[in-house]
Amino acid sequence: MSVTNLEYLFNPKSVAVIGATNDPQNAGNIVMRNIMAGGFKGPVMPVSDTAEAISGVLTHASVKNLPKTPDLAVVCSPLDEVPEIIYSLRKRGTRGAVLMGSGFACMSPEERMDVKSTILKVANTPDIRLIGPKSLGFMVPSLNLNASLAHANVAPGKVAFLSQSDSLFATVLDWALAKGVGFSHMIALGSRIDVSFADILDYLGSDPLTRSIMLYVESIKDAREFMSAARAASRNKPVLVIRPGQALDTVLGDLKLQETGDHHLADAVYDVAFRRAGMLRVENIDGLFDAAQTLGTPRPVYGKKLAILTNGTSAGILAADRLLTGGGELADLSDSTVEAIDAVLGAENWSRSNPVDIPFNADGKAYSDVLKLLVKDKGSNGVLVMHVPWTSQPDVEIAEALCAALKRVKRMVLTAWLGSGASARSRDIFQESGIPTYDTPTHAVRAFLYMAEYLQNQEMLIETPDSLPSDFFPDTSGARDIVAKALSDGRDELTEPEAKDILAAYGIPVVETRIAVSARDAVIAADTLGYPVALKLRSPQIPQPFDVGGVLLDLETPERVWEGAASILARCTRERPDAYIEGFTVQKMGRRPGAHELCVSAEVDPVFGPVLSFGHGGMAKEMIQDTALTLPPLSMSLAKELVGRTRISTLLKGTPSHVPADIDDICLTLIQISQLIVDVPQIASIDINPLYADPEGVLALGGKITIAPYEGEGESRLAIRPYPRELEECVTLKTGRHVTLRPIRPEDEGTHREFLASLSDEDLRLRFFGVVQRNFDHKDIARFTQIDYDREMAFIATASDENGNPETLGVMRTNTRPDNTEAEFAIVVRSDQKGGGLGSMLFHKGIRYTRDRGTSKLVGQTMIENKAMQGLSKKFGFVVSPDPHDEDLVEMVLDMETVAE
């Protein structure tokens, strides 16, 4: 993952077209025509050994003969010639290339892999960054650069579009031309042997010309890189994504399945990954642009309650229907709002409810006056103004009046002017004023709901997690020993007692279980456990014993157990004579009358790694199909969000016929399973079904765990890096006070707020370069405490105060570039803690961490009068020098190769 040299791709000063030709059907000719027609201001150098001039530009025989080194090379030559061309470009010093040549699509997977490795070896990425092969190219309209095979140029705009599909690239371009939509970038990624979604998201995330980013995604190759880049970008600007979903399995067939690694849960996993990254998934191309238009405005939406103002009753009803079926709500107008509208329209002339049905002869002033009242109503999160063309109503005049009324309004207002003709002119007026406008109520309502969903996803990203209801201290070594023994025995599945021993080791209550190989052993096990018991068949060929009558409940005597074992064997022999019978599972009956039957499971997705699911359990699980997925790691907030996405969550709160469940205990169980699959990466899947839940907590009745060898660390399987507990350490200050140095956690928001409040004005001035800021809101603190451990680190020093409450004494932060070449640091220690060695301890920890992750350089800035910081940095080997760009600052640079182990 790297943004290195991407500026040469997307902001080149000169371009070479390799494989240029005068054949109008050839890619080399199409690209030359597009670049010249676009009006690119820099040198354009076609390379051809057959033509003297192409598109009016003299050619050069080879890369070696080019008069200057091109920043960007568009390579249209056949793929078998590409390695030699890339080698020549690299020798010349070119830093970016787009590979458009044919041949990649018809290769076998083995041939593709061979070509890919050869090209990457020659390019020595990131020396040359490569888009493609099999790329349609890209456009940067602000540079008048059309380095693509597209059929037209596009206007400059604030939206970037990245596509994995050439056909979608062309389709979106055509759609944008018809709608008059502009772009900052349009990029067709092709086969992504180098530059990936993650790389370009990092680049565009900090691009000032890009206000929002749209993606067409079919598959992701490195989930952690993608998630880190997407989370970072979506914190700065809206990121929207469209993915075809199940069509990848059913329409594109086995070939696409092999390429993407998708399986039966693939689309659902992508969906939860997009949500977890703070992105907004939309259904189609129209939805992309509808959402982009709304999200590009500075007026946020903090809920799904919409007020509708319309001059057509039926149109208002259609909008309300779309709102309600999409999960939105009609805003309840306050009595004061209703009375105020009465004064404007007359009580007898409107619906006196939402939708507000304004008279068909109302003029621009009436529209504006009612709209002003609706935007002030605190019961709504936005207003949709609709207009149906009537002869007696001047469309354009009303539009102009509304634009004038909305100049200082901060509430989200959308418009839908139905029809064409004068309605089209009105929509142009709204667009020129920056007011989202649509030609149908369906599009307008969909855009509103998209914005509400997007902001909900953003809020989930920065929501402060609840503290765990209770601490749990898992017996990790015991769980690992059980798995290691099973693997050494050559098994890929644990016995049920082994599975329950592991669950119990992680604090999950289980029903005691025994294994029996015969009816006699089953009776002995039942006597040991105590009656009543449940008896279940064990056979590798029969994963669901219920299907063959292999489960008996409430056996209260040894005789019933003996007879039950015999009857199970007889039924199994009759119905499944091919099955090998291993014996029986004997389980003490779990008496939880009225408890809810839930299911908690985990499995490993080939792209995103471990995935957790929660939902309705029991024998009817497959029929009810009530399951939600999420990616670990989990906090209490994320666990509650997962539970809340299921239908059974309503019942868990309690009804007249259902006891309420302990939601906190359910969420704790989800967190425990999340931790288990990190700590024991040899676990391939977990299935707890049923998991009883009632006011007393949870109880696992069934437990199944499959295993497989795995050599890496458990956290490496996750798409999101979990809290790095291994970086915690205890130190003792010069004063004798014991302090814990550890990575910051989202749950630290409260103590971190107190820490910032405790800093002196001088501390804040030096930390924030002259700005004394004390008004840190929730979003500010969330950015400090909710970090991506893959890219950022914040080590806090924490200890207990005189009342035994935790307090933060200091913090050392590092922010690492995506390519890991450089990390920037900042450190601040509470004034009353200075002189005790805490600053040096935090600084040393941050330096060790940066060195251990392989970062090349650690850098920082401080004010020129901050001699203490400069002295501390020199103590650790930093080179301190004046900042060449700001005379009030100094730079501190540490070459990590000089840092001792």
Image (cartoon, rainbow, N blue to C red):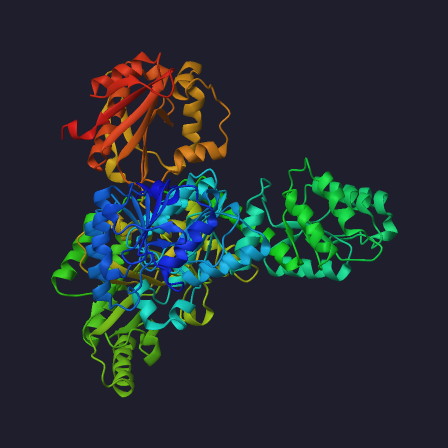
Asked if residue 459 shows in the view, the reply is yes
> Residue 414: where, in percent of width, then height?
66, 48
Q: Residue furthest left?
A: 488
Say which quadrant the N terminus sits in: top left
Locate the C terminus and report the quarter of the image it occupies: top left
Position of residue 888 relative to residue 360, above or below, is: above
In this view, the residue in front, 236 or 394, is: 394
The image quadrant of residue 67 is top left
Residue 668 locus on image (x, y percent): 38, 49
Q: Is residue 634 in view?
A: no
- Front-lying residue, 335 or 689: 335
Total labels: the figure holds 0
**Residue 457 placement (x, y as % from top left):** 49, 48
| Residue displayed at 15% across by 56% down | 484
Left or right: residue 291 compared with residue 587: right
Check the image and name the residue furthest to the front: 52
Question: On the rendered structure, is 738 left or right of 53?
Answer: left
Name the residue nearer the viewer: 716 or 253. Answer: 253
569 or 875, nearer to the observer = 875
Q: Residue at x 60, y 41 (%)?
A: 299
Residue extending farthest to the bottom is: 574
Tell me where residue 29 appears, x and y as whole percent: 38, 58
